[in-house]
Amino acid sequence: MVKDTRFSLGSLGGLAQGRAQVEGGQAVRAGIDEGLRAYMLRVYNYMASGVALTGIVAYVVANVDALKNVIFGTPLMWVVMFAPLIVVFAISARIKKMSAASAQAWFWAFAGLMGLSLASVFIHFTGESVARVFFITAATFGAMSIYGYTTKRDLSGLGSFLFMGLIGIIIAMVVNMFIASSALQFAISVIGVLVFVGLTAYDTQKIKNEYVATDSGELMTKKSIMGALRLYLDFINLFMMLLHLIGVARD
């Protein structure tokens, strides 16, 4: 009887210890999940705020003749066109040395400069088609970002393929600046939509996988800004490709 009692007590002790370990593991996972959701929400908030700032600046510039004439009626147009690209490279190159406040300031500056550049969208295309394409872009982006966040499939293998597609698009766009081929522009837009749809899912999963619960507030902020910047570029480029496909030009 003593032996049986000891065996029972030992078994109960083992079960209790095992249950405690399981519950502890569940608590850790719950904490990570909660932290990940908060992190991704921060990324999406930065990204959405950047898109909103870009849209507001673009709309104002396109509808204020004085601003429109200064930017698009002078050589300043070329500065406005290439400045966002320079800022992106600057952020990417110096993000590790920046403070979180500096990274935020650079991100907002980039979004504002993109607004100056994209004012041409409101000038060239009708307001109705711009709004329609924006909502189509938002729905497509949202669906693919949700897929990238929830899928169990590893999308890392798509990265190199999509990057090669992106390089091809950039080269084709440069070539088309000289030959102005409508057929080539159509091909660029179709391939561009596919590439940036894929990049939206890929970048979302990559941002999710980069989350580390032990990161400090400073580092977490900078990582969320870089994640927002990647998703912002996916959204804006997808919007532009769709606009060239189905947008309606002004008479």
Image (cartoon, grey):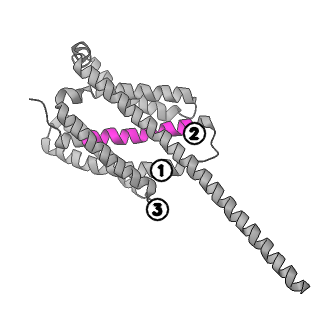
Q: Which of disc 2 and disc 3 is earlier in sequence?
A: 3
Q: Secondary structure at mark 3?
A: loop
Q: CA distance from mark 3 to mark 2?
A: 24 Å
The numbered mark at residue 117 is: none
Q: Residue at x 18, y 34 (%)?
A: 128
Write the residue at 42% across / 28% down. Answer: 87
Q: Quadrant of residue 13?
A: bottom right
96 in relation to 201, above or below = above
Number of marks in the rendered image: 3
Q: Is residue 81 visible?
A: no
Q: Amino acid at mark 3?
A: Lys
Q: The magenta stretch spans which residues? A: 221-241
Above-or-below relation of 197 to 71: below
SS type, badge 1: helix
- Nearer-N-terminus badge (1/2): 1
Disc 2 residue crowd, few under 14, some 14–19, many 20+, Cα 10 Å: some
Three-letter code for the amino acid on which mark 1 is drawn:
Lys
> Which is closer to the viewer, label 3 or label 1?
3
Magenta stretch prevailing secondary structure = helix
Q: Which mark is residue 206?
A: 1
Given the image, on which type of amino acid does mark 2 rest? Met
The extreme bottom residue here reads 1
* Residue nearest the observer in this picture, 220 or 134: 134
Q: CA distance from mark 1 to mark 2?
A: 15 Å
Q: Position of residue 226 (x, y in %)?
A: 48, 38
Which quarter shows the N terminus?
bottom right
Mark 2: secondary structure? helix
Residue position marked by numbered label 3 in the rendering: 152
2 with respect to 25 (left or right): right
Q: Residues within 10 Å of mark 3 (few under 14, many from 20)?
A: few
The residue closer to the viewer here, 84 or 177, is 84
The numbered dot on residue 220 is 2
